[in-house]
Amino acid sequence: MPEVIIHDDESFERALKRFKKKCEKAGILADLRKHRHYEKPSERRKRKMNAARRKNRRPRYA
């Protein structure tokens, strides 16, 4: 679980922004959305195949 310590000279909004960023990097919201409803194994395979296609379609820069 991400944890943020609020410093004396820091506003609450700034600390909340840091907390949201840590949650996003930890993948908490993505995991929550993923478990919101049951996904059949065939749907999961189809979603992963589509994601792989999108990933391979993007141009790569070295």
Image: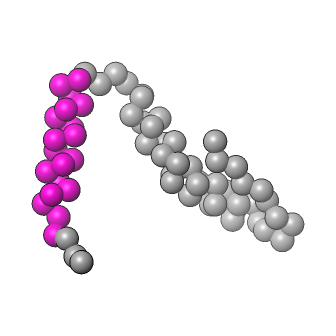
Q: Is residue 54 above or below residue 61?
A: above
Q: Residue furthest bottom?
A: 62
* Magenta stretch, residue numbers: 41-59
Quarter of the picture holding the N terminus? top right
Q: Residue at x 48, y 46 (%)?
A: 27
Q: Is residue 33 above or below residue 21?
A: above
Q: Is residue 29 magenta?
A: no
Q: Residue at x 23, y 23 (%)?
A: 41
Quarter of the picture holding the C terminus? bottom left
Q: Residue furthest right?
A: 8
Asked which colour scheme the image uses, the reply is one colour
Residue 6 is left or right of residue 45, and the answer is right
Q: Residue furthest front?
A: 62
Number of on-image labels: 0
Q: Residue at x 51, y 52 (%)?
A: 24
Question: Does the magenta stretch mainly form a helix, a strand or a loop?
Answer: helix
Residue 46 is left or right of residue 26, and the answer is left
Q: Is residue 47 above or below residue 14?
A: above
On the image, the x and y values in percent for residue 32 come to 47, 35
Q: Residue at x 64, y 60 (%)?
A: 18
On the image, the x and y values in percent for residue 40 come to 25, 21
On the image, the x and y values in percent for residue 48 come to 22, 40
Which corner quadrant of the image does residue 35 belong to?
Answer: top left
Residue 49 is left or right of residue 34, and the answer is left
On the image, the x and y values in percent for residue 20 come to 59, 54
